[in-house]
Image: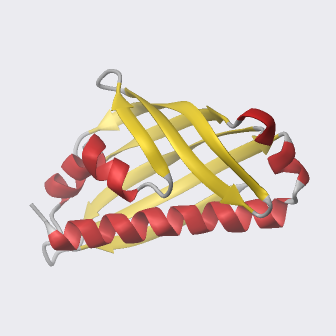
């Protein structure tokens, strides 16, 4: 499944870039995030609890940052295992642009695949849930940036 979106954030590009690389900020904004640990400058480990339709599971996985062009964007790829629920993997290209009014336009294009029970519940349901998770993350991220733009 493919997704794309853009969000206007009330903070400068440097502040948004710093927040996108802050594990504490990401932990607060990722829906269902139970643990987030930086393993290196480009790798994170996460545990996330999600519910998609009738399937609820805890996923453990790794996220890698690549094509890093600070403070303009990066590529993020990840893979997670949810036990009997199955697996998910995917990636996104995230870019940041100045808006001219002191804010930042964050754009992303993402692709994801799922397997196991998740793949059996239907692609429309999974795609809708993935879109909602992305929207929930960016809404929380935008609110956090509005609360503390520095």
Judge from the rendering whether residue 128 lies leftward or rightward of residue 91; answer left or right.
right
Q: Residue furthest bottom?
A: 101
Q: Residue furthest left?
A: 150
Judge from the rendering whether residue 68 lies leftward or rightward of residue 12; answer left or right.
right
Residue at image position (47%, 36%) is 46
Q: Nearer the viewer, residue 150 or 84?
A: 84
Judge from the rendering whether residue 35 lies leftward or rightward of residue 54; answer left or right.
left
From the image, which quarter does the N terminus lie in? bottom right
The mark tally for this picture is 0
Residue 72 location (% of width, % of height): 28, 49
Q: Is residue 51 visible?
A: yes
Residue at image position (25%, 66%) is 144
Residue 136 location (% of width, % of height): 48, 68
Q: Is residue 72 visible?
A: no
Residue 147 location (% of width, % of height): 17, 72
Q: Nearer the viewer, residue 101 or 23?
A: 23
Judge from the rendering whether residue 97 lies leftward or rightward of residue 53; answer left or right.
left
Q: Quadrant of residue 115?
A: top right
Q: Residue furthest top?
A: 40
Q: Nearer the viewer, residue 150 or 117?
A: 117
Residue at image position (62%, 53%) is 50
From the image, which quarter does the C terminus lie in? bottom left
Judging from the image, the colouring scheme is secondary structure
Residue at image position (23%, 72%) is 99
Q: Nearer the viewer, residue 121 or 71?
A: 121
Residue 32 location (% of width, % of height): 50, 54
């Amino acid at each position: 499944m493919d997704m794309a979106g853009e969000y206007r954030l009330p903070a400068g590009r440097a502040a948004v870039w710093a927040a996108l690389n802050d594990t504490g900020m990401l932990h607060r904004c990722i829906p269902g995030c139970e643990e987030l640990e930086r393993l290196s400058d480009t790798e994170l480990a996460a545990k996330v609890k999600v519910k998609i339709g009738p399937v609820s599971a805890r996923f453990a996985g790794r996220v890698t940052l690549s094509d890093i062009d600070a403070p303009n964007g990066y590529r993020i790829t990840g893979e997670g295992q949810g036990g009997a629920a199955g697996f998910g993997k995917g990636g996104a290209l995230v870019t940041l642009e100045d808006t001219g009014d002191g804010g930042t336009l964050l754009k992303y294009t993402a692709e994801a695949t799922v397997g196991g029970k998740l793949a059996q519940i239907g692609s429309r349901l999974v795609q809708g849930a993935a879109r909602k998770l992305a929207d929930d993350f960016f809404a929380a991220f935008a609110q956090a940036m509005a609360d503390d733009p520095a």
